[in-house]
Amino acid sequence: MNVIVADVLGMCFGVRDALEIIENIDQPERVTIHGELVHNEQVLDKLDRRGFQQTDEKGRHSLPLTDQVLITAHGISRRERQRLQAGGKTLIDSTCPLVARAHEAAQKLQAEGRHVIVIGKPGHVEVQGIVEDLHSFDLAPTPEHVKRYPHNRLGVMCQTTTPEPLAAAIRNEIKRLNPQADIRFIDTICLPTKEHQHALERMLDQVEGVVVVGGRNSNNTRQLVERCRERGLPAFHVQEAGDLDPNWFHGLENVGLTAGTSTLEETIRDVHQTLMHMSSAVAA
Ligand code: SF4
């Protein structure tokens, strides 16, 4: 069995910068991380061991007990920022600049008097942060959610980790069902997401199955898994090397390896090495 590694995979600069900020915090016990820093259980366990307080993503409405609050790479709404500051909290901001750009795009569309349609996953923290500052919006996670909107001016933007083909299908459906509307689209899909997806596409023609490494709750990891399955290939989603099962690979000659944007390099290395061992066992 050959293992083919995607030419772009793993951690993006947004997550790397957030980890660097957190690495340099001297007194972790005085800081609450407002939600999951990244959707990666190994990273969250490490932060726990260092002594950080961590608020559950669904429990962010209560005021953290520590004086310092770290905003994650997924960002928060302006409204939430004001609530924390009014509660006397000092904010340490690790919002990814590309998430901040998505917030600005939504605000710009709103300032132009448009009803904003956010292409994104309902309930995801990034999406939550964007829509909390909007007066008039709808969410469109799939083309099936698109409807005829009772507005003449529409603005469309995306969660940063949306696959490009999905965004294109939703845009087309918005146009089809709203021929009367003046529609403006701002592409807010982040470059690392696009590069990961393009690298996966290049690899898919060469393999019969793909191992995807990343957190269970990671949206971009799940999108990589879904793309493999859409192409009719088995996708094996693992969080670490110990999740790999040699039985998955019987009869496969070429297996691909990719990883989501919050996956640590050491985790990818472990998974790769374990796959190489399995591959020589299969060959023997
Ligand atoms: S996936 Fe994109 S938007 Fe999210 S942290 Fe990474 S670079 Fe930023």
Image (cartoon, helix red, strand yellow):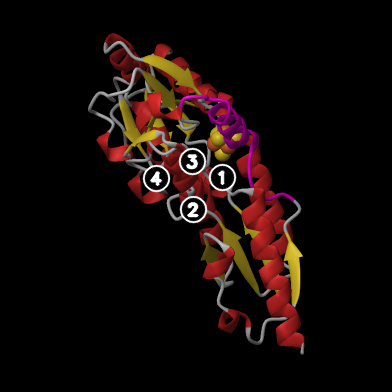
* Helix, strand or loop under label 2: loop
Residue indicated by mark 3: 38
N-term mark: 1 or 3: 3
Discs 1, 2 touching: Cβ within 8 Å: yes
Left/right of residue 77 with respect to residue 92 in the rendered view = left
In the rendered image, residue 212, in percent from the top left (x then y), is placed at 58, 61
* Helix, strand or loop under label 1: loop
Discs 2, 3 touching: Cβ within 8 Å: yes
Local packing at callout 1 (Cα closer than 10 Å; few below 14, some 14-19, many 20+) is: many
N-term mark: 2 or 3: 3
N-term mark: 4 or 1: 4
Magenta stretch?
8-27
* Residue at the spot 28% in from the left edge and 28% down from the top edge: 150
Observer able to see residue 39: no
In the rendered image, residue 69, in percent from the top left (x then y), is placed at 39, 22
Residue indicated by mark 2: 215
Q: Work out which quarter of the rendered image holds the N terminus and state it.
A: bottom right
